[in-house]
Image: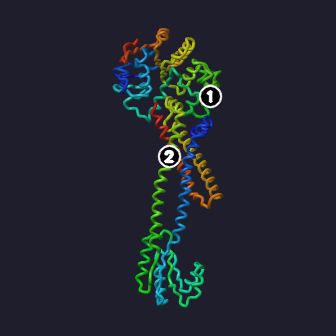
Amino acid sequence: MYAMREAAAAFRRAPVLTGLSSAMVGLALFVVGLFSLVTYNLRLALSAIEERVEVVVYLRDDARQSEIDLLLTELAGLDEVRLVRFVSKRDALERARVELPEFGELFIDLEVNPLPQSLEVELQPGARSPEVVEMISDQAMAYPFVEDARYGREWVDRLFALRRIGAASTAVLGSAFGLVAALIIGTALRIAIFARRDEIYIMRLVGAKNGFIRRPFLLEGALAGLMGGVFAWALTYGTYRGVYSYLFEIAWIPSGWIAIGLASGCAFGALSSAVAVRRHLREV
Amino acid sequence: MIKLTNVSKEYPKRGAALRDVSFHLKKGEFAFLTGHSGSGKSTTLRLIHMADTPTHGEVRVTGFSSEKITERDLWKIRRRVGIVFQDFRLLPGRTALENVAFVLEVTGTPAKAVQTKAQRLLAQVGLATKSEAFVNELSGGEQQRVAIARALANDPYVLLADEPTGNLDDRATRGVMDLFWDINAKGMAVLMATHDLEVVRRHPHARVFELDQGALVFDSADTSEDD
């Protein structure tokens, strides 16, 4: 009760200082918010590309339907495989006509369909890795009626290299931004508490218990963290709307991320207040 | 009540601030702690308030020993030992009443009783009519009275005063000294550090300790070992 009243009173007594520290917390978290927005959208873009990772198994013209069905069933039975589609020679030609209109003339005059029949193997999300596609193509290649199995090796390798770089830079940059935000929040709250060192001093002098002294500051820190978090959320959302309306379509951060951001702002606010108060508690 | 046994205090840079000091202040006593500046008066009060620990020897205050007290239990001593300073150390930007009420609140007085008790404490130090005045609107003597009211908030057994009249004119000094005697008459021990010998001379009934370069060179009772 006292702790809540004091925390509220602190905002009332020094609105500029507490406002400023909340704004600093907010700006620091805004950087993290922007980073999340970029990371999330890059991740979305990458997984959209990954969707297209599939293995195409080309079959010899003389492969019997029963053999093809056997292979299809076997491949479809794998855990990593979402779907196997059979593309007949005629389907392949039809698709070529639609997808490559510039060669339209060429396809009309054909006496023999040169395109092979094939099985298109779509993978489960999470299984679109170089190892899996290689394993599937090896398995298919073991059949004598399989001409070839392709998955764009170089392309998949490059995609996964990109993904690894993405993950690493997210981790490094994310930690760096997080650390900077943490330092700024810590400093902001330390200034706010420094301004009230007299109160802490008097409380120690007259025999207030340490826990009692700490509580309003923890609450205040958590509150500043929360306010900063909301402020950062508003700024990030504003940026998102701006980019969405004037530049290009992007996705908004999932609400789970926002909840984590607000909660960690709160927790970190309380924590850095606790550390700052501790320093002053040792003085008397 | 307060017992110092062979207490020495050395600071890393300043060197020895107290040398082998022993004395015993009994319940309800009034004593002056005199000496030039730098003689160790403030250090003695700090040790009694347990803001610092002695390098050698033992300080015992209302049953607590400097050798055993932990950081967690410091508050217990602070509530039994009130303290005032030359520079008052009030919270600026708050009224006299708020300064006293703050102490009551943070030491666990029930919320309902805070205002009444704070008013009573201010009345006790003669400031009943100034309770709503802000600290900067009060004279030095009045500010010291607020500080005294604050020190009395937890009904301590002893009141420590570190040069409480150092910033006051003669009239305010007399007022504050009368207040100390009133408080003492109710059974509270008072230990007042001062370098002002005129103040000491005016109160011949008080016990006098004199410090010189950290050593206790005079004790008017000279019976520090009895009791």
Q: In this view, does A203 lie above or below B138?
A: below
Say which of marks 1 and 2 sits in front.
Answer: 2
The residue wearing badge 2 is: A182
Given the image, on which type of amino acid does mark 1 rest?
Thr
Q: Which of A1 and B27 is in front in this view?
A: A1
Instruction: Report x, y in % for residue B220.
Output: 40, 11
| Image label count | 2
Mark carried by residue B91: none
Dot 2, crowdedness within 10 Å: few (<14), some or many (≥20)? some
**Quadrant housing the N terminus of chain B:** top left
Colour pattern of the rendering: rainbow
Say what amino acid the circle numbered 2 marks: Ala
Label 1 sits on a secondary structure element that is: helix
How far across and down, in percent of the image, does residue B123 sit?
Answer: 61, 21
Between A202 and B137, the residue placed more toward the observer is: B137
Where in the figure is residue A141, as x and y percent of width and height?
42, 81
Q: Is there one chain holding both mark 1 and mark 2?
A: no
Q: Can residue B162 be seen in this view?
A: yes
Residue B103 locus on image (x, y percent): 55, 30
